[in-house]
Image: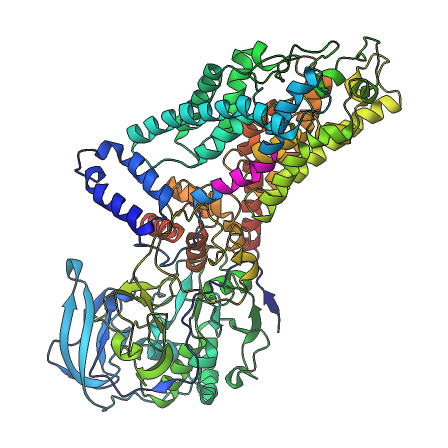
Amino acid sequence: MKKFIESQFDAQRHLFEEGGKLHWAWPLFEGQETFFLTPRHKTKHGAHVRDRMDMKRLMIFVLYALAPAILMGWYNIGYQGYLAEGVASPGVVDCMLRGGIAMIPVIITSYTAGGIAELIFCIVRKHEINEGFLVTAMLYPLTLPPTIPLWMAAIGIIFGVVIGKEVFGGVGMNILNPALTARAFVFFTYPAVISGASIWDLGGKGLLSSGPVADGYTGATPLLAASSGALVDGTASQNATEILHSYGFEWSNMALGLIPGSMGEVSAIGAALGAVFLIATGIASWRIMFSAVAGLMATSAIFNALVIYGLVGPDHGSMMTLPPHYHLVMGGFMFGAVFMATDPCSSAVTDIGRLIYGFLIGVLCALVRVVNPAYPEGMMLAILFMNVFAPLIDYFIVKQTTRRRAARMATA
Amino acid sequence: MPDHVVRKGLDIPIAGGASGPPAVLEAPATVAYSPVEFKGIVPRLSVREGDTVKRGTPLFHAKAHHGMQFLSPVEGTVKEIRRGHRRVITDLVIERTGDGVHTYPPIDPASADADTIRAALLERGQWAAFRTRPLDNIPRFDAVPQAILVCATESGPLMPGADVLLDPADKEFLQAGLAALAKLAPQVHLAVPKGTTHPALQGLSGVQVHGFSGPHPSGDPSLQVNLVCPPKAGGQVWYCRAWDVAEMGRVLKTGEFPGQRVYAAVGVGCAQPRFVKTTMGAPLAHVVGAHGEGPMRWIRGSVLTGEAVGAERWMSHFARAVHVLPDEVESELLGWALPMFGTWSFHKTFLKAFTGAGAKVDMRPGIFGGERAIVPIGVYGKVVATPDVLPEFLFKSIVANDLEEAIQLGLLDITAEEAALCTYICPSKVEFDVLLKKGLELYEKEAS
């Protein structure tokens, strides 16, 4: 099998090499060859032997880490659809089928549209295909509602790949996380499609629909509900947990991810499993994840304390009372902290810098959720904002390190 | 004895290590020097093709200082002077004819003054054993170091250490050499493996002894200088190897240049990896003996920082090992996505990173990936043991040709071995050791 594939590539190689007819498509050839076969290039300069780890493996392992979140989200799309239509206990196979019909086209669209943009850039700029794209094009659809029109998803990923990454010079040079750049583009360009109640589920829509949406179903996400300041029956309330319970949101089903939300980010447990895998394999920074969780929980605990000690007025808003462990499992926080904030290219690089960077993401996320009335969820904005500040954080840590070095070298 | 436990670094578990006592080989028919190996020294030949020399006769000297000489390891005739690009002398080949010795007057390092010792070390071919920190150059003939660190440790992959290279019977000469160094520098440090029981390293006087342990580069003298006695305020610190110091002591005390070396022939390309005792600058094939079929890469030194040379050449003046590495790389089907249970890696995306402790891995000189921009997943800092160096930022400043920034970030501190380890582990396949050389060259160009 290997020999056959090797011979196929060897037979075509001359066409794509320097001077060949199809040399312009070299990145395409190279990308395909290295997809099938690990490269046979030998070392010429520097250390004679090298580790077997490469960028492709790094990126595919991020995809492996995404598997629990994807599977949970996949199931949940179908589950929410049936729930909205009043089906009490839909079968697993039905949920997966219905979820797949909604989710897979968006993922395929993301890979195709983004892939074409990526390939054009590779050919024009004559560099090899950056496998970071594999991760970007998977992360992006997972942050979208299942009901998003495919053309919109396509425009978003093209924007993310081109403006978020390629204009800076590709993976490693980008300032912002490309997947979040894509999502932010869709978020601000088509706000009606990506925010608000009842966009997150397929209730009454699509193939395999069992009927119209049942009476009394709201389709609100937990964050939207918790910030609404009213129970599901319209009674005003300043107690976020009470409101959530009235909507049927318990901590347990929010942690599992059986709630309306983006396709892949609903399950905090799914993201946490991914986190364990990423930390064990040494791919993502535990410092960022840990400090983001700490930042979110500390800030929300402070808001809770303000309410408890009566330091804010009576109409402080229901979000102030949301306990830290609820914050943790709601919205896209866990997914963002594990997969988005840890993007090594757009995060801080120094160890201490990563702790600060992650902590501030947690703080900002809680701030946007609780204090900002416009957006119920703040994770995307928190990460993008801190992406911009990451070089500044590093700058101070680097300065401190060089000062320490200089002091050590000066004393005899 | 202050102990230094180096926690950062990596012992690359490459297969093909030698074991056992050194086999004494018959003298080879030819030996050679590579003057081009003496970085920063412009050679002026003292002999011509066809001249006869004795063991200890100067072959060439430094253009900058005629007193800095390099001696013939055998009695014989100068057979050939091979030149390379821009007529640099690549090999000075001597055909061995006998064992006649050119002797020098004995000097007692304990009673001689510093100038006598300096002149004798220069004259008797010993000066190139010294290296400066920063820059790892051979020191100028008149330079004065802030300290000298004598390194009796080795941690490079499959490189021989004191147990092989330092003869217990040479303790007397090692002590004499250390006494000579004490005349050249206000402080002399000796780095030994922590808890060593080597007889020649016990009870030495006139030095501060430091024990080192931990993964490579714990045994690298450049790192040890960084940890023990970093150069202050633009000055320089020298380092050298304990076995070279023993040779210095012997040459001073007896006046006779031994011209003998213990070498290691390692790597899975050797039919039988081994230690040998033979003439300095012996042919590679003489040291290696039988080797495997197929294309081989002959590396003078270690797989991390050694130099690949043609099989027909000779041993390095400096490196005490030749690594024979099969020069073929096989591809693997979908290797990037599969678990690859049998493959060892520094990175924990391979199961063997967890379970492969103590394994010996048959490595090949493949890159195993496409070159990408640096994606800082925080791995480089795990193999850089020099304190207060942030490798990602340092190397980016070198890429940007920002010399001032690079110096502030530790361009002159980070060691060649550390940069090579960064190259080894890099998932983006960036060649940091090449970058470091580029940065240091830029520095030397600007400084001169």
Compare residues A320 and B129 and report the one nearer the observer.
A320
Is B159 drawn above or below residue B363 in the view shown? below
Which quadrant would residue B234 be assigned to in this image? bottom left
Q: Which residue appears at 66% of the width and 12% of the height?
A: A197
Compare residues B419 and B74 and report the one nearer the observer.
B419
Q: Is residue B211 magenta?
A: no
Compare residues B293 and B62 and report the one nearer the observer.
B293
Which quadrant would residue B181 be assigned to in this image? bottom left
Which quadrant would residue B74 be assigned to in this image? bottom left
Residue A410 drawn at (x, y percent): 54, 54
Mark count = 0
Residue B442 drawn at (x, y percent): 34, 48
Residue B55 drawn at (x, y percent): 25, 85
- Is residue A35 visible from the viewing direction of this image? yes
Q: Is residue A217 left or right of residue A103?
A: right
Query: Can you say which quadrant of the picture contains the N terminus of chain B?
Result: bottom right
Magenta span of residues = A60-69
Is B192 drawn above or below residue A397 in the view shown? below
Q: Main secondary structure of the magenta part?
A: helix
Q: Please, which residue is most extreme toward the right here?
A: A309
Q: Which residue appears at 53% of the width and 30% of the height?
A: A139
Q: Which residue appears at 31% of the width and 73% of the height?
A: B317
Q: Is residue A230 left or right of residue B77?
A: right
